[in-house]
Amino acid sequence: MQTRTGPVNSSDSPTNPSARPTQADGEPANDSGPAAVPRHVAIIMDGNGRWAAQRGLPRLSGHREGVDSIPRVLDLLTDRGVEYLTLYAFSTENWTRPPAEVEGIIELLHEALERKSDLLMEKNIRVFHLGNTDHLAPDTGQVIERLQTLTRNNTGIVLNLAFNYGGRQEILAAVKRLIREGIAPEEVDEELFSRCLFTAHCPDPDLIIRTGGELRISNFLLWQSAYSEYYHTPTLWPDLDAAELGRALDSFSSRQRRFGNIPPES
Ligand code: FPP
């Protein structure tokens, strides 16, 4: 978790009626006009198990195929000018899955992070971990840490890997930290709170995509998604291709974001 950075200017707080919601980087939220590109796309990668079942394969084959889809999606989003991609890889609730599947997913993550470090450097991608490293084996914690350090000077797309991540847990941790640091209630505003979250380094997600057909948020970026646009698709994560991703981005571009305001007079 990031440390608190400097005093907080409360002029952008929601008590200022002209202000759009602010975020960790102190920037106003992305106000998309027509054909806008989302700065930050976040994806709930659902459907790996069903992808495998459709082919009579074990669930882990679906997760493996899911990992293989990541470079393709990263390339497509980079080409479209997206600056931040957050992938929901493993939630705090996913620990309740059968141990063999949990171990398999963690192993896949570990392997992918080790094997893809050259590619991440070559493509100038900066990696951040969103989530806790407790419950993870020390070597998995270390590989995540190493990759964050290795890529810290990269200036291309930022890849946030939400792994052992839960939105409610993240909010509780931020509350506990503010109390521990003795912050007075009147000092707490949206910007300060956002800086206590794992996403302190990036703007809120503009677009959240969920593959696999389910229509729920599953404890993902609960604070940060206050004004995110949603896109759902029945396409299973390993099948997400350029056409479907293009439809998601086009759908975003066609929306008018009002952040609680009313449409401008035409
Ligand atoms: C959801 O599909 C997928 C997951 C819970 C795991 C996704 C994890 C990866 C793709 C590995 C992450 C690795 C990196 C490098 C980010 P599901 O199992 O819920 O599918 P189902 O709904 O069809 O059963």
Image (cartoon, rainbow, N blue to C red):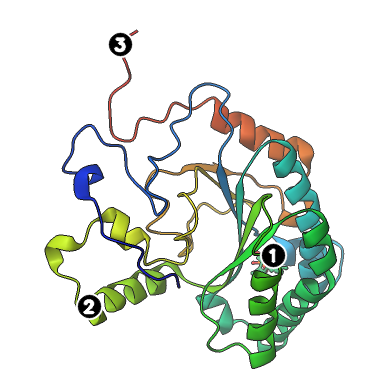
Q: Quadrant of the C terminus?
A: top left
Q: Residue at x 43, y 31 (%)?
A: 31
**Residue position for label 2:** 179
Among numbered discs 3 and 2, the one appearing first in the sequence? 2
The local crowd at label 2, few if under 14, some if 14 to 19, many if 20 or more residues have their Cα within 10 Å, is few
9 w.r.t. 36: above or below: below
Cα–Cα span, label 2 and label 1: 32 Å
| Rendering quarter of residue 81 | top right
Residue 134 visible in this rendered orientation of the protein: yes
Q: Where is residue 195 in the image (x, y as percent from the top left)?
A: 37, 62
Cα–Cα span, label 3 and label 1: 46 Å
251 w.r.t. 112: above or below: above
Q: Which residue is drawn at 62% across and 29% down?
A: 250
Residue 53 visible in this rendered orientation of the protein: no
The local crowd at label 1, few if under 14, some if 14 to 19, many if 20 or more residues have their Cα within 10 Å, is some
The local crowd at label 3, few if under 14, some if 14 to 19, many if 20 or more residues have their Cα within 10 Å, is few
**Residue position for label 1:** 151
Query: For numbered disc 1, what is the local secondary structure?
Result: loop
What's under tag 1, amino acid-wise?
A: Thr
What's under tag 2, amino acid-wise?
A: Ile
Choose between 30 and 234: the one closer to the eye.
30
Choose between 103 and 35: the one closer to the eye.
35
Among numbered discs 2 and 1, the one appearing first in the sequence? 1
Q: Where is residue 219 in the image (x, y as percent from the top left)?
A: 45, 65
Query: For numbered disc 3, what is the local secondary structure?
Result: loop
Left or right: 95 in relation to 143: left
Choose between 24 and 57: the one closer to the eye.
24
Q: Which residue is drawn at 75% across and 82% down?
A: 107
Which label is found at residue 265? 3
Which label is found at residue 163? none
